Amino acid sequence: MDQGATPADARSPINPGSFVVTNRSVLAIAVPMTLAYLTTPMLGLVDTAVI
C-alpha cells in the first residue's frame, strides 16, 4: 500500500468532511418548520370559517 495514499472514504460525496453544528444553525431550520407546522391547522379553520 502506498504511504501517501488517503483512505477512499475520507473525502467523498457521501462524507464531505466534518462541520460544526451550532444552536443558531439548528434554530434557523427548526423555527420556520415549526411555524409552518403550527399554521397549517389554522389555515383549515380559516377556510371553514369563510365558507
Image: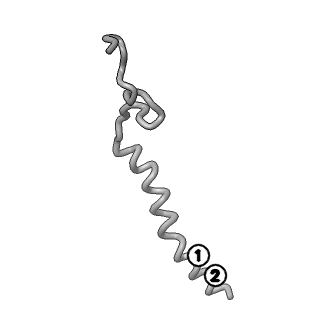
Query: Which mark, by number, is residue 47?
Result: 2
Q: Is residue 13 shown above or below 37?
A: above
- The amino acid type, in three-letter code, at marker 1 is Leu
Q: Is residue 41 left or right of residue 27?
A: right
* Rendering quarter of residue 16: top left
Query: Which mark, by number, is residue 12?
Result: none
Residue 15 image offset from top left, x and y in percent: 41, 35
Q: Nearer the viewer, residue 6 or 19?
A: 6
Which residue occupies 41% across, 44% down?
A: 25
Q: Quadrant of the N terminus?
A: top left
Residue 38 image offset from top left, x and y in percent: 48, 69
In the structure shown, which secondary structural element does the residue marked by tag 1 occupy? helix
Which residue occupies 38% across, 30% down?
A: 9
Q: Are marks 1 and 2 in contact (CB under 8 Å)?
A: yes
- The amino acid type, in three-letter code, at marker 2 is Asp
Q: Is residue 6 left or right of residue 40?
A: left
Q: Nearer the viewer, residue 1 or 33?
A: 1
Query: Which mark, by number, is residue 43?
Result: 1
Residue 37 image offset from top left, x and y in percent: 48, 67
Q: Quadrant of the C terminus?
A: bottom right
Residue 6 image offset from top left, x and y in percent: 36, 19
Q: Is residue 32 shown above or below 19?
A: below
Which residue occupies 42% across, 27% down?
A: 11
Q: Nearer the viewer, residue 5 or 34?
A: 5
